[in-house]
Image (cartoon, coloured by chain):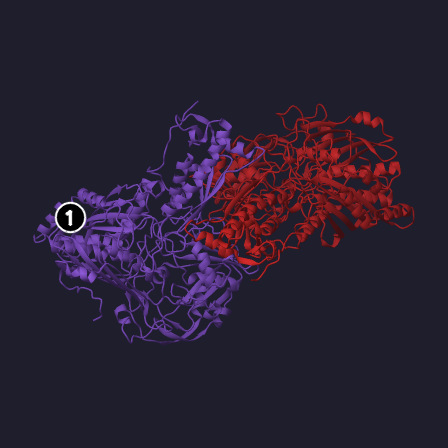
Chain colours: A purple, B red
Amino acid sequence: MPTIEKESLIGKRVPKMDAPEKAAGRTRYVHDMNLPGQLIGKILRTDRIHAKILSMDTSAAEALPGVKAVITAKDMPAKMLGLNNDNPPLKGDKVRAERDEIAAVAAITEEIALEALKLIKVEYEDLPTLFDPRESEKEGAPHIQESKDSNVCMEFEYEHGDAAKAETEADFVIEDTFKLHYVTHACMGVSGVIADFDNITGNLTLHSNTQVPFLHKREFSEVLEMDPSRIRIIQPPIGGGFGSKLDIYPFEPIAVILAKKSRCPVKIVFTREEEFMASPTRQPAYINLRSGVKKDGTITSRVFDSLLDNGAYTSWGATIPFVMMQTASSFYRVTDCQYATKAVYTNNPTAGSFRGYGNLQATFAIEQHMDKMAEAVGMDPLEFRLKNAQEAGEVTGQGMHFKTCGFKECLSTAGEKSDFSRKFAENNANRGNGNPVKKGIGMASMLHVGGGAKIYPSDGCGTILKMDDFGHVTILTGASEIGQGSETVLSQLVCEELGVPLSAVTVVNNDTDITPWDVGVHASRTTFIGGNAAIGAAKLAKAKVLESASQVSNIPADQLDMRGGCIVRADDGEVIMQLGKLLRGMHFKDKAELVTTSFYYEPPSVHQDKGFKGDVSAAYAWATHVVEVEVDTETGIVTLDKVTAAHDVGRVLNEMSLEGQIEGGIIMGQGYALTEDLLVKEGRVITPNFRDYKMVTAPEIPEIDLSFIETQDGEGPQGAKGVGEAPSICMAAAVGNAIYNATGVRIYEAPYTPEKVYRALKGAVEAPSMAAE
Amino acid sequence: MPTIEKESLIGKRVPKMDAPEKAAGRTRYVHDMNLPGQLIGKILRTDRIHAKILSMDTSAAEALPGVKAVITAKDMPAKMLGLNNDNPPLKGDKVRAERDEIAAVAAITEEIALEALKLIKVEYEDLPTLFDPRESEKEGAPHIQESKDSNVCMEFEYEHGDAAKAETEADFVIEDTFKLHYVTHACMGVSGVIADFDNITGNLTLHSNTQVPFLHKREFSEVLEMDPSRIRIIQPPIGGGFGSKLDIYPFEPIAVILAKKSRCPVKIVFTREEEFMASPTRQPAYINLRSGVKKDGTITSRVFDSLLDNGAYTSWGATIPFVMMQTASSFYRVTDCQYATKAVYTNNPTAGSFRGYGNLQATFAIEQHMDKMAEAVGMDPLEFRLKNAQEAGEVTGQGMHFKTCGFKECLSTAGEKSDFSRKFAENNANRGNGNPVKKGIGMASMLHVGGGAKIYPSDGCGTILKMDDFGHVTILTGASEIGQGSETVLSQLVCEELGVPLSAVTVVNNDTDITPWDVGVHASRTTFIGGNAAIGAAKLAKAKVLESASQVSNIPADQLDMRGGCIVRADDGEVIMQLGKLLRGMHFKDKAELVTTSFYYEPPSVHQDKGFKGDVSAAYAWATHVVEVEVDTETGIVTLDKVTAAHDVGRVLNEMSLEGQIEGGIIMGQGYALTEDLLVKEGRVITPNFRDYKMVTAPEIPEIDLSFIETQDGEGPQGAKGVGEAPSICMAAAVGNAIYNATGVRIYEAPYTPEKVYRALKGAVEAPSMAAE
């Protein structure tokens, strides 16, 4: 009999299953979809920044032939959007920001819809504006959300140990204030939705790019005052998410109400300008940081304060301090930590969630601050970090338990491979030479959740697995594919259990009526949580298959294995029978049975307690990036030459997609550090296009030297951790440190555009301050 | 605490769940679907009937701008279609029938595709034709399928008892020959498919109206020489099936090969003329029947012989004798039965399967023959049938076991409610009066499978059931909804188990990658088999829910029940908690779990043995129809005034949909009896449109008096049996008997068109003969 060796796809370079169709242009995004009878919806946004709406006249728009529905605030359910219930999908009484939606039209063509928008007449009375969060928080500032007591939309404080006391034990106390800017996701696929409301049954189908279909099912039911059972969310392939599709934004209920009123499916797709102007941003922030350090390099205390510009409405952006806090409290050994944060309303754009979720901002501050502390005590930045870095087994003051921790290995690997300490010293020494182009090397590390984050009552994922008569496997998973490659990695994990080739697996993951629940794509959780759910279902299937094979072959099930689409003897791989044949045998016998299993995986993480303490993730990811730059002191141009990165990924599941995800994240971080700047002047986005909003493009991508640290997480699927957000997080801090290494000038404000760097080198950039002038 | 009484939807009048969207024109049939980049496929059919293809030139078609692919036989895989592997999807060497496909084109518009067809040049050499099956079977007739030994494509014989001997014991021997005509399904939704072939991955998605998606997955893999795992069949809502979509017909592989060659999705939708000309028909047949009967009315013997016109290729039509045989052998107590059948090739249209599957033809013969026997022994037709009717407990000579049997109750109910015997005698007496319009009453009954039919290795159905956090239930069932109302009845059965309202159920039933296996829609099996599968999954879910409720409430699970979306005490209905709340509690606890179950139901039926004996269905359905007609002897017009029908349905699950299905079937049977006639002259369909092919329309629908006989089948879901085919089956026979009752003239050939009846009344219609003149 032939034999089959055990083959594994784990750790291999496996192309993403959806790559060929994406490369061939066959992928059908929501933009490509058109339902029969579909209308095009367009949104009228205000031309004011902060104003009372005195009157609105839609009669001319309604009379335009081809217009099937015109809606204003009075057509909408009373329920508001957002974490603070402060965002009416259509604004009826006043507008508070440039992006504010005041009316919408559904028409048989886009041209007619746009023409109709022009026919809507609005009268306003302007109100005083607030564009600086430091002004907003002042006593006596006009209230942007008039029903609230103040402009503060979120604030809290946290403490472990006694930072004030610990600070007194320090030899040096370093204090810095940093300022972070607006960037936006700039997804290649702009926001889009098709709402298909059945007026007869009351059923709503949303073809939506959401990252959290199951949460949206519930939330839409609240916003639309509907039975959640009647809402079905179907996710077409998504042209980029990165956190921008984690919340319900006004265009979505607008599409539903247009569909309801017109009795036709309504599609709303943003223009690129709308996407820049009206989709969420990363939260801009002021961060003040004060740390005590002893001469020997021991950190004694940390006090962290932040002020966030929330914009006029509250989305997830206001909650990023919960993630920032982890970096403040637990990234390094900080026995005494005090943390405070506040988010305030302004008339600026609303911030949402964005890959890294506050950790780019926190790490920008902390990792530059660490370099300053190292300098203060006269240590090399790498040596200083190694001294204070966390290790496996640590339970931090905030309750995070690092069961595995590759932080020191990340530091030393990236440090050694980049020859960091030698170059750092050399650049330092070369600062004063006459060469106008200075070389700099900078390092930054990061801590991020790598095994989900228990925020919602469940952080789990369900999987149903079915095998057909030919050994083909369908995985019905709650986990969404949003381009991160989950489909491929879940398939690999199932192949590993069931010994079938990748081509034998289909993943179904895009329909709330079909797939079991999952909390959604965020917190770098899909591989970890969805992967463990898939493994669970596959193990049950394997047990059923081997039990049946055992009956047929009279070999005990524990001596059998599944390999190469066959049942084999576990010890020598001798083929007992072909899997499809066994499955047909199970199906086509008197007591017929199919192999259909289901599994729900809930990670062993816990919710934070009232004091914000608790082990919220099942695993934690670590990374160190060393960046090498050239700073042209005559132009301010910073060129990123090389990134040497080391990531604790638990275990490599798919080397190719891991590289892709980390390289993509590095480049996104590079954009945040150097080029991307959503400029907002007096509440208006003045860079709403790819000419003025500068993304990193291929020629600017640096050399990347990537190392994977495999700590074999005990809870992770095949030992892996989540890494989706990690690679973006420490880029800006590392670049800031490298610029300092090159020039001796510390710039406390991102991005490091030529203008800013040039001005800073000339001493013309003031250090940010938490208080307004 | 509030209490909830047990409420049941079983037996209620529940509107079909898909009715509103169908009524509102919102249903999206394959005709309404358009995939991005889709091309339109058109088929070139021969203009000959039987001819050699000498040459074909497609160069001009290929050169036409907008044409993306032109294919001929040489582009097709070698595998042929049909039960006898005798039907090449594109014919390359010769054509054998009007509908023969010789080339196909995919183009960017329908107009261009049609223009391209005109540019294809073909040269033929005509061959001798055969249009009469009685000529075809003759020795020396030219072979239509030249690779076969003869024109016989199927024949077999069966016997139980000793009919020859039993015939000698009869007091009377009656022998008749009947002839049945062509009819076609005339579905409102013409045949259509969209083939979406991914040339990169090799995956094929077919948006197909098939009734048997899982069988087609396997069969397409054979026809297309593909891995079955790579074929996904998605069923859009179907505009009528009735058996016409049970086989793969040439247009389907043609669409796939066009898609493969053009690298675009290709849609082929028939014109109405194509549908009449090239879709399957009901099998035309000659039936010879000889029965012995004693003076006391006991049937002693039956000899049944049939000759079927197969057309040029073999589809399911050739297998209808297996069903006809059941009616011959087991419908009445026939201790000695001899059965022979033969299907032969002709140059006529190919016959497929059609609601009733041969039983309309068999019953047409047998039930008129029964009236003749009754007349011979001087008995009333009802009395004669009651004497010979089967009863519960009977195991027939062919091995069918009638565990429940409402036959006699059907007979007596329909007989009494119609006042049959009195009217029958009265009409008899009035035959001779001078009134040119004669009243007639006729009766016919039928036996049909009502619990599936074990033909394929499994006759089962799989179901996966999932409950969401709000008590909403999704049933992923293999059972297809093709308009028969399965979605609604499966939902009712699940509601019965889980105590939730119908609005809390979604049925997903249209995608082979998602749903578990089912053998497909045929043999009146969906309610029975799919229903039992759904009940099985629901019972498992209920056990899981009540177990959890028991833990929460400390009440033993067997004292709890599910009602009105709540968990209640079984005895007094006291509400313990809301179902959604319990489910959320199960989901959002440390050991989180979802309620997801699966069940595969395989009926206890068996395959026929080599002697064609065996209990092939889990239950059997019975019905009696009494029809009342007026025959205008001056015009030959037969008006159907009233149908009094009684059906053994096991148990009424949904009174409204049951009425709908039975009334629809009666009207379909009325068409077969009176108006529908697909006229085929020299191999050409000469009635390919709704003007010439006369369907029954609303004004001609008779009064219908419907009774349900509830025999509470032990195996059936809630006691129900399948009834999908039953109501069409006995209409033509009953009308034939009624015409005889009115006029004293027996017409052995359907349909009873005015011309035929008029000519018969004038003695100008010869009785059919099994042998050609």
Q: Is residue A236 left or right of residue B361?
A: left
Q: Is residue A261 left or right of residue B626?
A: left
Q: Position of residue A514 (x, y in %)?
A: 49, 49
Residue most extreme to the right = B433
Judging depth in this view, the residue of B712 and B739 nearest the camera is B712
Quarter of the image that includes the C terminus of chain A: bottom left
Judging depth in this view, the residue of A7 and A457 nearest the camera is A457
Quarter of the image that includes the N terminus of chain A: top left
Label 1 packing within 10 angstroms: few (<14), some (14-19), many (20+): some
Label 1: which secondary element = helix
Q: Is residue A130 left or right of residue A496?
A: left
Q: Is residue B507 visible?
A: no
Q: Amino acid at mark 1?
A: Glu
Q: Is residue A129 visible?
A: yes
Q: Residue tagged by mark 1?
A: A383
User: Residue, x 25% and y 51% (percent of image)?
Assistant: A446
Judging depth in this view, the residue of A353 and B671 nearest the camera is A353
Q: Position of residue A10 (x, y in %)?
A: 35, 37
Q: Position of residue B20 (x, y in %)?
A: 60, 57
Location of residue B338 by image quarter = top right
Q: Is residue A699 above or below residue B606?
A: below
The chain identifier of the residue carrying mark 1 reads A
Q: Is residue B30 above or below residue B447?
A: below
Q: Position of residue A38 (x, y in %)?
A: 50, 57
How many discs mark residues in the rendered view? 1
